[in-house]
Image: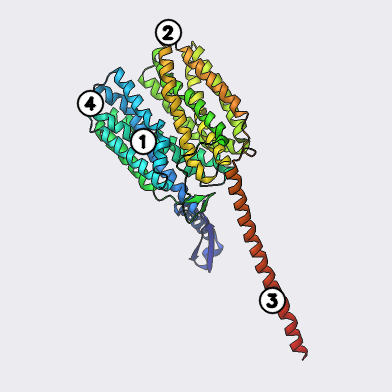
Amino acid sequence: AHGSTSWEGRGTAHRCRVQYTCGAAWGHGGLGRRMERAVATTGRAWGWLRPPATAAGRGFVLIATATVATGAAMAAQQNIVANYFERELGLGGPQFGYITAIREIPGFLLIGLTALFYRLSLPRLTAGALLLLAAGYGGFGLSDSFWTVAPWVILSSIGYHTWLQTQYALGLTLTTEQQSGSVLGRLAAYNNGGALAAMFAVFLIFRFDLLSYRQTFALCGALAFIAAAAIVRFPNLHDGEVRADPTLRQPLVFRREYRYYYLLSLLDGGRQQIFFSFGLWVLVHRFGLGVPTISVVLLAVTALAMGASPWIGRMIDRHGERRVLAAVNVGYVAALAGYALANNVAVAIICYVIYSFIFPLSAMGAATYLRKIAPDAEVAPSLAMGVTMQHAAAIVVPIATGIVLNYVGYQVPFLIAAGFASLTFLVTRRLAPEEQRSPRRLAEDDGGRRAEGGERDEDARREKARTSVGAGAEPGRSTAGRG
């Protein structure tokens, strides 16, 4: 007897038919049924390994690969760089401050860098940035002093800050604006997964002396190179559909219509830099936590973010940027105020975890809001402008709050950060993307609707012509028969 079963690979549009031949007794017995179940199970397993059927699917695989590799490279580098500077290069406290300032300068100048290379397609610009990141991380291991490491800091910072905005711009092209949050949430989960794996790897490497600092930096560079090799093949997409020609980006964009996005970026930059500059310092200085405890806290935050990021992205799609970002900033106020006023280490750790958990929502929500009000050609340069504004605050605010710390307690900077979050909450109440689309976005949408309407009209004309031909042929045959 001949039998067949069909299966559809999960996550793809491919259908594959598996045929098998067996004896009559097998076809009607238990062995035949078990064989059929085994074939179907094997088919489902193979479906996971099949390449995606759509360009958007291939694009997601490529950017997910780049995101995992980049997340791992950055997490590993950040885990070892402080010890490397102190133990291998002999840098002191003031030099750490100088290195931090040098690292943030490319972020402030990002808008000029992206304007300079605006003719490059977004995948090629991103691949070039990741190559700079790879060279910078690899170069760390070749340094022996402050002056020899500074150029590699600048090089890697250019790559990092460019990737910071282009990853969102590329991710937003994978789907429609109604599902943008879900895609960015999944990519954030992949980033956290790569970071979590890197943290465990660094722990094992230095616990058992498997590699030196220089070899580990070379490994970080290799991971960034893998990310560049993946992202350079990213297809040119719009709403998940292939475009024959890449979108021509504007070299520089600063428009009144995007003022709320700029305000979100500026206020978020001030808030997050206070927390990043002094958050862990408070746990160490005020509550006396050691390296093992800090490591456990960071691992817990990363694991929690990895699991929750897809859900967070779906919340943005479901409830909209206005409601989600408003709730997030209420959470910021509570976490930052609690962090400032807590006298108990457990409360401080809980506030730290809450802040770190909701932190990715700000960038995701701002990016999806911008995507809804700006035309394609202005999304990437506007994201770059947002990163530049964040770093304008990142350079000024930590220095100012650092000076304040000389005269007051650590509580004051965190209360200032809570004030930034309160102002951001007021801005989020003004968000209405459907009503705030820029004139260029409205023109782009109108052009798309006209093109779709033209295609429908052409299809209708063709269908009418076919119907007319068929209607004219039938009487002819009937007349001939009567003759």
Q: From the viewer's perspective, is residue 482 above or below residue 39?
A: below
Q: Dot 1, how many residues are within 10 Å of its Cα: few (below 14), some (14-19), or many (20+)?
A: many
Instruction: Please tell me which residue is depicted at 26% across the width and 35% down the height of the picture.
Output: 139
What's the CA distance linking mark 2 and mark 1?
Answer: 35 Å
Q: Is residue 252 visible?
A: yes
Residue where numbered disc 3 is placed: 469
Instruction: Please tell me which residue is depicted at 24% across the width and 27% down the height of the picture.
Output: 147
Could you tell me which secondary element the residue under label 3 belongs to? helix
Give the amino acid at mark 2.
Tyr
x, y percent for residue 272: 47, 24
Q: From the viewer's perspective, is residue 69 above or below residue 470?
A: above
Residue where numbered disc 2 is placed: 407
Give the amino acid at mark 1.
Ile
Which of marks 1 and 2 precedes in the sequence?
A: 1
x, y percent for residue 380: 47, 41
Which of marks 3 and 1 precedes in the sequence?
A: 1
Which of marks 4 and 3 precedes in the sequence?
A: 4
Q: Dot 4, how many residues are within 10 Å of its Cα: few (below 14), some (14-19), or many (20+)?
A: few
Residue where numbered disc 4 is placed: 145
x, y percent for residue 250: 47, 44
Q: Dot 2, how many residues are within 10 Å of its Cα: few (below 14), some (14-19), or many (20+)?
A: few
Residue where numbered disc 1 is placed: 158
What's the CA distance linking mark 4 and mark 2?
Answer: 33 Å
